[in-house]
Amino acid sequence: MCCKRNRRVKNKNINELAKEYDELCEKARSCAEEIGRWIVDACKPVIKDIKYSVGSIEYGTETISFYSKKRNVVEAFASDDTVRKNLVDFEKLIETIIPALEGHIEAPYGIFLTQGEADTISALITAKIVEKNISQRMKKSIGRTAGNKPKQEQAKTERTEKAKKITFIYKKESKNGNKNKYLR
């Protein structure tokens, strides 16, 4: 396969290659923007001030960087292993949940979470992934079967209610003071 691809590339002139390269870069940037928005939307119930950007001089165009002023570890504790071992690194959490993003997620100033917050984010992202997959399957099956709309709406309502319960539990824990005191 590699040889066939090389022959195909060798048969193109530099202008065709440059145009294809530009189109692929734009597609990659567009996908990264969508992924960044998707992750931010999923994490907002836990990390209220989370933001993202795509690409940078330091990390390259293939990296999605996330920022939170309130979630980075106070500088004095940044090197303290006893503090850090009790916190979950946002980058590693996202790469664990979505392995295809490994090496493409960055939190340049650090985003750290308590284990409870990490569990909540994991549940929210997993629920969003499942909901998206179910939604896509439903769209495909709608063309094949008619009359399933009430069941589909009921399933969507159940998923939404489950996500609301997860968010409510997190908010309840936050009000009870289950926050790590080393987070800003």
Image: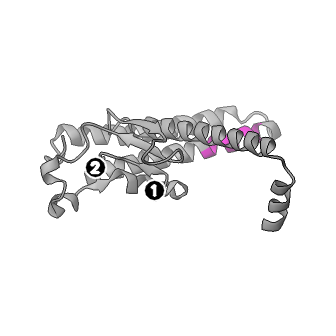
Residue that label 1 marks: 95
Residue that label 2 marks: 112
Q: Are there few (<14), some (14-19), or many (20+) residues within 10 Å of tag 1? A: some
Q: Is residue 86 magenta?
A: no
What amino acid is at disc 1? Glu
Q: Marks 1 and 2: CB-CB under 8 Å?
A: no
Q: Residue at the location (15% across, 60% down)?
A: 80
Q: Please tell me whether the stretch drawn in magenta is mainly helix, strand or loop.
A: helix
Q: Are there few (<14), some (14-19), or many (20+) residues within 10 Å of tag 2? A: many
Q: Residue at the location (51% across, 43% down)?
A: 128
What amino acid is at disc 2? Phe
Q: Is residue 139 magenta?
A: yes
Measure the alpha-carbon separation of dots 1 and 2: 14 Å
Is residue 157 visible in the rendered structure shown here? yes
Q: Quadrant of residue 141?
A: top right
Q: Residue at the location (73% across, 42% down)?
A: 18
Q: Which residues are magenta?
A: 133-142
| Residue 116 x/y as whole percent | 28, 51
Q: Is label 1 in a helix, a strand or a loop? A: helix
